[in-house]
């Protein structure tokens, strides 16, 4: 791991960042009405649950009111971070140079982070809920909720002509940490490329929502992202919010959304026997550079692709959820009633599965 990683002093420059960027780093939420409503809910939960709520209690099992939700399922929201797939994954799929392919995959993953910053939470998916969609270039997207406790989402994304196959499984974790919420999607992201059968595997960083109860509401990503191409023996490490090192460590701290890292080639052990072939810098709020060359920048006309609902999806598709449909129409009362009905149904079905396993002597695994 990247303990003691120092941001190179000669690269501690000012990078372009989105207008939503906080001075200290991260995405500054400016919707004061939504923030105030959420804070009211948090204080009510503290009254009900007690101070333990702010001391690491998991939020994935806490029922939250519909008033602070946006009218879509998490299965729809998860595709927000893939908005640049039609650009960078398609480019990676035709790259014969494995280092250039790695650069495009890293750019795809980092550039998409800012598109995941939302003010309101989506609806928790129901076990068995699915989502089918696509991007305008023909990229197909399939998601399914395979577990409720813990919440686990599976997905696969197929590029045009199946030039790339992006798939994975993520367990969503979230908990309070004093005045912040710490979240993480645990699991691996795999991208297979039809051109040569290569694969790149990576994981996501932690996300922090600061100012949950008081102060500025800021969304920050933090930690190490590792990208690995085992076939070509290439590994990359990208540190978000790196330390400032060298003679310039006395200067003002860099914004927390800055990134730094390397792409390495190795011979046998990716953690030891390796040499850097490219330097990574930039900010997940504005640009990604390799050896000072910009691969993504908010200054460029780089389109973000939005999810398009697929024609004739399965009956289990997110768009058919009654609670989401009513909230989208602004009908709060039936939306709240349907949310409760679906949650009760999910609990009843879980009880049926548990009883069946007990009757048959099968080891019961909650989902």
Image (tube, rainbow, N blue to C red):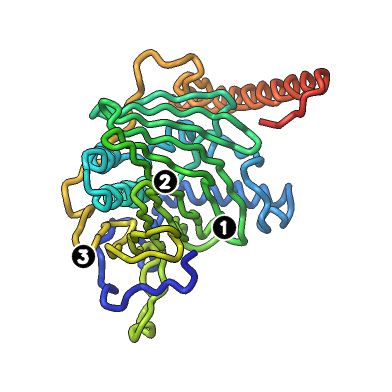
Q: Position of residue 127 (x, y in %)?
A: 59, 26
Q: Considering only vertical position in the picture, is 312 above or below 69?
A: above
Disc 1: CA contacts within 10 A as few (<14), some (14-19) or many (>=20): some
The reply to whether the C-beta atoms of the residues labelled 2 and 3 are less than 8 Å apart is: no
Determine which quarter of the picture holds residue 78. Answer: top left
The reply to whether the C-beta atoms of the residues labelled 3 and 1 are less than 8 Å apart is: no
Alpha carbons under labels 2 and 3: distance apart: 24 Å
The reply to whether the C-beta atoms of the residues labelled 1 and 2 are less than 8 Å apart is: no
Q: Residue furthest front?
A: 268
Determine which quarter of the picture holds residue 161. Answer: top left
Image depth: mark 3 or mark 1 in front: 3
Task: Decide which of tag 3 and tag 1 comes sooner along the chain.
Answer: 1
Label at residue 185: none
Alpha carbons under labels 1 and 2: distance apart: 36 Å
Residue tagged by mark 1? Answer: 213
The residue lying at 18 percent from left, 54 percent from top is 299
Q: Nearer the viewer, residue 250 or 242?
A: 242
Q: Position of residue 139 (x, y in %)?
A: 30, 29
Q: Nearer the viewer, residue 17 or 150?
A: 150
Residue tagged by mark 2? Answer: 201
Residue tagged by mark 3? Answer: 292
Q: Is residue 254 left or right of residue 208?
A: left
Q: Secondary structure at mark 3?
A: loop
Q: Secondary structure at mark 1?
A: loop
Q: Nearer the viewer, residue 90 or 33?
A: 90
Q: Secondary structure at mark 2?
A: strand
Q: Position of residue 158 (x, y in %)?
A: 34, 29
Can residue 34 be seen here? The reply is: yes
């Amino acid at each position: 791991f990247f303990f003691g990683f120092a941001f190179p002093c000669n690269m501690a420059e000012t990078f372009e960042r989105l207008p939503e960027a906080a001075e200290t780093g991260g995405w500054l939420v400016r919707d004061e009405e939504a923030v105030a409503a959420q804070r009211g809910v948090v204080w009510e939960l503290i009254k009900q649950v007690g101070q333990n709520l702010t001391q690491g209690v998991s939020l994935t099992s806490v029922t939250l009111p519909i008033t602070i939700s946006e009218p879509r399922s998490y299965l729809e929201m998860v595709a927000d971070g893939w908005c640049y797939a039609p650009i960078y994954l398609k480019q990676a799929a035709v790259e014969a140079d494995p280092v250039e392919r790695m650069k495009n995959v890293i750019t795809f993953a980092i550039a998409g982070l800012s598109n995941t910053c939302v003010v309101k939470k989506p609806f928790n998916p129901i076990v068995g809920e699915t989502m089918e969609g696509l991007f305008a270039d023909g990229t197909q997207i399939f998601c399914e909720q395979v577990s409720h406790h813990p919440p686990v989402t599976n997905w696969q994304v197929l590029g045009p002509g199946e030039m790339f196959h992006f798939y994975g499984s993520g367990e969503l974790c979230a908990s309070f940490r004093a005045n912040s919420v710490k979240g993480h999607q645990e699991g691996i992201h795999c991208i297979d490329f039809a051109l040569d059968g290569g694969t790149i595997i990576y994981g996501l960083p932690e996300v922090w929502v600061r100012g949950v109860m008081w102060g500025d509401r800021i969304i920050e990503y933090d930690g190490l992202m590792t990208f690995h191409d085992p076939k070509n023996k290439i590994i990359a490490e990208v540190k978000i919010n790196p330390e400032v090192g060298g003679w310039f460590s006395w200067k003002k701290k860099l914004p927390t959304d800055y990134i730094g890292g390397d792409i390495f080639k190795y011979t046998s052990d990716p953690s030891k026997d390796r040499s850097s072939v490219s330097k990574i810098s930039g900010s997940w709020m504005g640009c990604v550079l390799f050896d000072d060359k910009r691969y993504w920048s908010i200054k460029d006309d780089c389109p973000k692709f939005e999810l398009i609902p697929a024609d004739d999806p399965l009956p289990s598709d997110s768009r058919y959820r009654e609670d989401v449909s009513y909230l989208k129409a602004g009908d709060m009362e039936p939306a709240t009633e349907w949310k409760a009905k679906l949650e009760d149904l999910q609990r009843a079905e879980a009880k049926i599965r548990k009883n069946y396993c007990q009757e048959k002597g099968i080891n019961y695994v909650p989902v």
